[in-house]
Amino acid sequence: MVTSLNTPIPLEEEPVYTAADRRRMCRIVFTFILFSLAYSWFSDTLVHQLRGPVLRYPYVDLSYWVFHLAGIPEFISGDPVIAWLFDGALVGCCMLVLVFPDRRIFARLFFGLYFIYFILFNSYGLLHTSSKIGILLMPLPFLARGTRAFGLLWQGMRYFACFAYADAFLWKLFRGTWLYAQQGVAIIRENLTPYLYFHPHTLQTGIYTWCLQHAGFTNGLFVAGFLAEGFFLVGFFTRRFDRYLFLLSILLPVGFLFLSDAFFFELIILGLTLLDLRDKKRVGSL
Amino acid sequence: MWKNVYLARVYRYSPRWFLFVLSFALLTLVCNIAGVEITPFFVWGMYSEKIQPPASYTFYTTTVNDSMLVDTYSGYPDNSRFYLNIPLAYYEDMRAHAGIDPVIPFLQRKTGSGYRWIRPLEGRLFNGGLKGRFPAWYSRYLEQTLAIPVNAVKIGAVRVHYDAAQHLITDSTYFVEAW
């Protein structure tokens, strides 16, 4: 199936992927993942860097309960040697996928190891953050045998990307948060008060203070983000706007960072499914 | 038209895969309706609850080796700040409530008499008996992030509020704990 550079594939048509496409896409995705792991290393949050954490937070997520009841996070993080080995295996598997993208065993191992890391990071961080969900799920298409199965799962991940943002929109819609005039200001205050205290004279503090003084503007930013999330509903019906959705998938984490001091850039990996990565020229055109 | 929708294509490829994809979608939907996240069936409801701005805000400060105030907003990646701030606040919250993990009373409220099934698992799921263990870990993690030996840690708290012009006013700063 050949499509021109500017014509998105209709949703009812199934893109055809070659083994070379799958390899290229695998390398793009796992390069992103490797950067995410490097970020974890720089931010002292790989397992061996957590130095045997003692507080855990399974909360009401039954998957976390199963992991903690089995003692898996405690076993891995409790011993420095095991923690080092775990991190080595995690990063090593990611690199092996990059070198041998056709060997599914490495992607499978990586997926299993990252699932454990995901639970461990969120449980010992005392907050079930969504930022690493994209990294957790994006290897899934590369576990499949054959390019047809890969293509179907890749499209499934595209729907998941649209769902993630659309779901955030629907939660705010049904809870009426978008009509609540204090939400933007409240989010800044909740997350940035210590920053404003420690850095009273920076440009950034000046900007945040201005935002707090102009609640209408700040809430406008929140509502703009809400509408941008809602735009992802379009993705369930057509691919025509995928490049705009991809741009939004980059802009939204910028908004999250500004309003709530939340680093959600790892979620951009989900946005890759909105691009047609089969042809290098297409990637370049964006 | 319907024969070309995504799920129909998955079904034609493999009914087993169709069941897998459909189950994932349905379980995600059920979790969202119930408002309960069970990884990997995620609920994307962050900041969808209306936040009532409180009259004042309290946050913790950490001073290392009697002289170095740890300013997590300068030169720390977001994840480091996350790990330096949230566990400390959680621990101090537990200390303020007789060392009880706040998830326990929350679950007791939600499950009522059903909590008797969870109680035997408390020791493996929730936090308790942290006296000494948390300070030791926090010192180790500070050493990791600061890359210096940590011999003494002092935890303080700051209470602030916003005036009518949205300027930050410090109400009090006080000592919380030291080790």
Image (cartoon, rainbow, N blue to C red):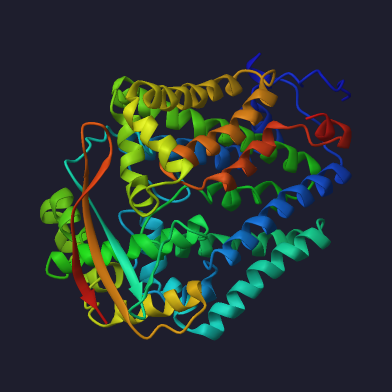
In the picture shown, does residue A208 fall above or below B125?
above
Q: Residue at x 77, y 39 (%)?
A: A148
In the picture shown, does residue A107 fall above or below A281?
below
Describe residue B2's horizontal placement relative to residue A124 as left or right: right
Q: Quadrant of residue A17?
A: top right
- Note whether residue B43 is visible: no
Q: Quadrant of residue B105?
A: bottom left
- Note whether residue B89 is visible: yes
Describe residue A212's horizontal placement relative to residue B107 as left or right: right
Q: Quadrant of the N terminus of chain B?
A: top right
Q: Is A48 or A4 nearer to us in this picture? A: A48
Q: Residue at x 69, y 18 (%)?
A: A240
Check the image and name the residue furthest to the front.
A201
In the picture shown, does residue B64 fall above or below B5?
below
Q: Quadrant of the C terminus of chain B?
A: bottom left
Point out residue A152 in the picture as x, y percentages from the top left corner: 70, 37
Point out residue B89 in the picture as x, y percentages from the top left corner: 28, 61
Q: Quadrant of residue B129?
A: bottom left
Point out residue B155 in the picture as x, y percentages from the top left corner: 27, 70
Q: Residue at x 34, y 38 (%)?
A: A187
